Image (cartoon, rainbow, N blue to C red):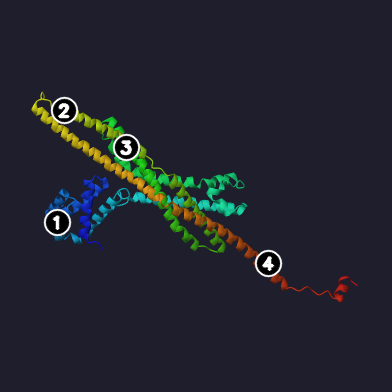
């Protein structure tokens, strides 16, 4: 187990380096300040001074040793609250997109649960339709799968249309949940747009928020798709354990195999066709801002040349050059903030690639489910044959219990009334 002091110092050090290099997200900066403020408020000026030294020299190992020594003397090793803040900071630095806040919004959790319930209901209804169609139509079980059904003209058109809409129904639920979650996250930001006085700036900010929300809804949809798949997959086997009889168990196993196939097939198709919405608009907005920044820098340089002329009064020249220097710092801050934001958003590509890396695994799961359906079809046929064979044997054994009455000569005479 890692030493709490080492954990705190590592978190502070990595946070400082990330901010120094411009790689820290807003959540990372907030988490760093939260950790720093916590240790300073609890352990006093000596800790604050040692952290100030580390902030001035974030790459210097001696400054980290100094912070560790002051924290240890102050008793921070026995503070689980500060250690938890350090762990959170390290987690955010490692994955700034996936951990936007310390605690999940309970409303988001309820929305996810509702999404899982809705999709489970959709899948249960789908399995019910498949079982009904299976009982009324001469068709192989695997031909009832969505990817094969469009070619089965013997299936009634209304039933075929209903079954083929499965993936779209799942997609609608996931996208609605994702949109609701992200809308809640950006509500406060949208409310603040009204505080921007300039109409043009307010419009540009609105475009940025719109593009950012489309990007996040897009990614959240992909994340929920995989999350819902895992949750539904975890629960289906429990149903088989509650089977009432052999036929019920066989039906449940068939339904489970169909469910697993369709879920895996949906996720595979979704991931393969997935594109990050809003990213193109964000790239264009970033490009436009950088062009405006470059024009501002050119204007600054021209103004500096004008102010440097001998005809300009020295006091005015000094004031103008000071203004230029201050604005240059503001421009640098804007450029750095945009660079950090774009780095964070581009991390979505890495996460999408990671999900795409799961496609071969999902394809194996899907193929396993397809073979399961085929084998269950064999088992159903074998059970029917065994049941038929058992019925024939029972009939034979019953017939063997009866003997024909002997047709004697006396019986013949009685029957013929002789």
Q: Residues within 10 Å of mark 2 (few under 14, many from 20)?
A: few
Q: Decide: is 405 above or below 160.
A: below
Which residue sits furthest top?
Answer: 311
- Residue ID for mark 1: 66
Q: Residues within 10 Å of mark 4 (few under 14, many from 20)?
A: few
- SS of the residue under disc 4: helix
Measure the C-alpha gap from mark 2 to mark 4: 108 Å
Q: Is residue 114 in sight in this rendering?
A: no
C-alpha distance separating marks 3 and 4 = 76 Å
Disc marking residue 208? 3
x, y percent for residue 255: 52, 56
Label 1 sits on a secondary structure element that is helix
- Circle 2 is placed at which residue position? 305
Q: Secondary structure at mark 2?
A: helix
The spot of residue 209 in percent (x, y) is 32, 38
Residue under label 4: 392
């Amino acid at each position: 187990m890692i030493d709490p002091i080492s954990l705190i110092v590592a978190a502070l050090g990595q946070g400082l380096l990330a901010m120094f290099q411009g790689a820290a997200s807003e959540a990372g900066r907030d988490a760093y300040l939260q950790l720093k403020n916590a240790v300073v408020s609890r352990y006093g000026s000596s800790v604050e001074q040692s952290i100030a030294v580390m902030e001035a020299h974030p790459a210097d190992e001696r400054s980290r040793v100094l912070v560790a020594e002051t924290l240890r003397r102050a008793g921070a090793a026995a503070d689980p609250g500060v250690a938890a803040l350090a762990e959170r900071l390290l987690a955010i630095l490692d994955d700034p997109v996936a951990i936007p806040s310390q605690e999940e919004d309970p409303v988001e959790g309820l929305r996810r649960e509702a999404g899982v319930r809705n999709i489970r209901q959709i899948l249960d209804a789908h399995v019910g339709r498949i079982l009904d169609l299976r009982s009324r139509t001469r068709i192989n079980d695997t031909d009832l799968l969505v990817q094969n059904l469009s070619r089965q003209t013997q299936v009634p058109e209304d039933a075929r249309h209903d079954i083929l809409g499965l993936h779209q129904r799942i997609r609608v639920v996931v996208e609605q949940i994702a949109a609701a979650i992200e809308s809640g996250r950006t509500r406060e930001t949208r409310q603040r747009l009204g505080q921007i006085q300039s109409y043009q700036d307010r419009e540009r900010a609105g475009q940025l928020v719109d593009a950012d929300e489309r990007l996040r809804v897009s990614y959240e949809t992909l994340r929920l798709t995989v999350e819902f798949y895992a949750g539904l997959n975890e629960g289906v086997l429990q149903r088989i354990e509650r089977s009432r009889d052999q036929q019920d168990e066989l039906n449940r196993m068939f339904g489970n195999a169909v469910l697993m196939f369709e879920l895996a097939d949906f996720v595979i198709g979704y991931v393969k066709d997935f594109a990050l919405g809003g990213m193109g608009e964000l790239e264009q907005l970033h490009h436009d801002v950088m062009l405006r920044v470059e024009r501002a820098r050119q204007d600054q340089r021209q103004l500096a040349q004008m102010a440097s002329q001998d005809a300009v009064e020295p006091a005015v020249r000094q004031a103008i050059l000071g203004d230029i220097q201050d604005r240059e710092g503001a421009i640098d801050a804007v450029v750095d903030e945009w660079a950090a934001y774009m780095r964070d958003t581009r991390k979505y590509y890495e996460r999408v690639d990671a999900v795409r890396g799961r496609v071969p695994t999902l394809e194996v799961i899907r193929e396993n489910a397809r073979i399961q359906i085929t084998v269950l079809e064999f088992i159903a046929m074998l059970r029917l044959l065994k049941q038929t064979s058992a019925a024939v044997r029972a009939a034979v054994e019953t017939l063997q219990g009866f003997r024909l009455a002997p047709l004697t000569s006396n019986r013949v005479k009685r029957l013929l009334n002789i």
